[in-house]
Image: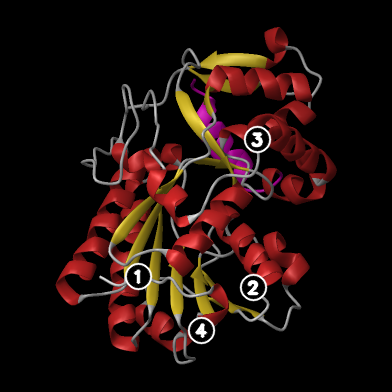
């Protein structure tokens, strides 16, 4: 194993970001372009439903940014984009929503396993110096008490989390078998601007702005640890620059809340009534009750979250209120069919 302890300015500076038009990937690219002036970013994205060019419209003309459309499962497309020397690959590409994985598991397995394998082979053949697999705390499964550590056994309980766990294990296996320079980050529930409006916070905020009801699963007492997307991006950046090969790093916000509590805050922030705007719907199949992760390893690298949940949530609500054209373009399209399929019978 090797460890990168040098100054970030010494790290060579062309990075391939896969899935960079998505929520976390686009926020990561924006952070890098703002705070790492010597880094060039190639954004490689298949432009599936959540890959939105509008997420990075503000940096599209930056000379240090280049977009290439491509699928991480396509080895030829990956090889073509790597014809230009690249020092690091950060893999954000993934199907992301548990509910969608229940409806269509195959797409998640394709991207989360076969796509990761394609990238890992490219790391070997092109001599890439760092590969960061961006994963999730959901791979640990339901955590009845305490906090999941990176060495804990994985116990995924949905097709989404199972595909992410498989990708993690494959990356670690390449590290052991081939000496590939792999690192894994496992983030907690992430929120903030540019999040596709299928997840709890953006879905509820946009529904409430339109004076519509919001679908709260079951009793709403599921517990999640909320992490602002900028804090998540900073954690991934630090792991890239300071992490030790063949290691996993948990990145959590330290903001444990029930879904019911978050819903109440959103309703209040939007000036709506809980009694009239919240409807309890049938719970998700196999819904994990609680996630919680120990982030001591990331803290030891020097990372701590900067955003407290209450102010971060208020700013997020304000962003969706101010940027209605961004999310209305999504919800006025194919999203409506998905929403009806997901919630009409519940």
Q: CA distance from mark 3 to mark 2?
A: 25 Å
Q: First in sequence: mark 1 or mark 2? A: 1
**Residue 36, which numbered label?**
2
208 is higher (above) or lower (below) than 275 = below
Q: First in sequence: mark 2 or mark 4? A: 4
**Residue 295, image quadrant:** top left
Question: What residue did someone put label 1 on?
Answer: 3
Residue 209: x and y, percent?
78, 30
**Residue 138, which numbered label?**
none
Q: CA distance from mark 3 to mark 1?
A: 31 Å
15 is higher (above) or lower (below) than 297 = below
Asked whether disc 1 touches disc 4, contact meaning CB atoms under 8 Å apart, the reply is: no
Q: CA distance from mark 2 to mark 4?
A: 11 Å
Asked whether disc 3 touches disc 2, contact meaning CB atoms under 8 Å apart, the reply is: no
Q: Is residue 258 magenta?
A: no
Residue at screen point 53% across, 81% down: 10
Question: What residue did someone put label 3 on?
Answer: 308
**Element on which disc 2 rests:** loop
**Residue 53, image quadrant:** bottom right
Mark 3 surroundings: few (<14), some (14-19) or many (≥20) residues within 10 A? some
Residue at screen point 68% across, 48% down: 330
**Element on which disc 4 rests:** loop
């Amino acid at each position: 194993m090797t460890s990168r302890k040098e100054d970030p300015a010494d790290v060579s500076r062309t990075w391939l970001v896969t899935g960079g038009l998505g929520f976390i990937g686009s926020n990561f690219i924006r952070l890098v372009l703002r705070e790492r002036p010597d880094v060039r970013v190639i954004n490689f994205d298949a432009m599936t439903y959540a890959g939105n060019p509008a997420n990075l419209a503000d940096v599209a003309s930056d000379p240090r940014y280049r977009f290439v459309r491509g699928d991480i499962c396509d080895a030829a497309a990956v090889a073509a984009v790597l014809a230009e020397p690249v020092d690091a690959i950060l893999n954000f590409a993934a199907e992301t929503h548990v509910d969608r994985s229940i409806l269509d598991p195959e797409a998640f397995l394709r991207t989360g396993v076969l796509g990761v394998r394609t990238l890992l082979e490219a790391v070997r053949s092109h001599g890439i110096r760092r590969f960061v697999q961006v994963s999730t705390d959901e791979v640990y499964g339901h955590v009845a008490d305490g906090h999941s550590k990176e060495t804990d056994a994985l116990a995924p309980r949905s097709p989404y989390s199972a595909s992410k766990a498989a990708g993690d294990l494959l990356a670690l296996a390449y590290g052991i078998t081939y000496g590939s320079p792999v690192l894994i980050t496992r983030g907690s529930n992430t929120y903030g601007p540019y999040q596709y409006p299928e997840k709890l916070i953006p879905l509820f905020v946009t529904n409430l702005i339109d004076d519509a009801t919001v679908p709260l699963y079951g009793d709403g007492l599921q517990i999640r640890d909320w992490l602002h997307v900028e804090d998540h991006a900073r954690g991934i950046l630090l792991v890239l620059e300071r992490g030790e090969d063949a290691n996993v790093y948990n990145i959590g916000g330290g903001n444990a809340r029930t879904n019911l509590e978050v819903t109440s805050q959103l309703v209040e922030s939007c000036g709506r009534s809980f009694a009239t705007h919240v409807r309890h719907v049938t719970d998700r199949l196999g819904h994990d009750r609680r996630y919680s992760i120990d982030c001591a390893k990331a803290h030891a690298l020097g990372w701590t979250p900067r955003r407290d949940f209450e102010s971060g949530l208020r700013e997020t609500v304000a962003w969706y209120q101010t940027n209605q054209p961004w999310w209305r373009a999504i919800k006025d399209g194919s999203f409506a069919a998905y929403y009806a399929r997901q919630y009409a019978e519940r």
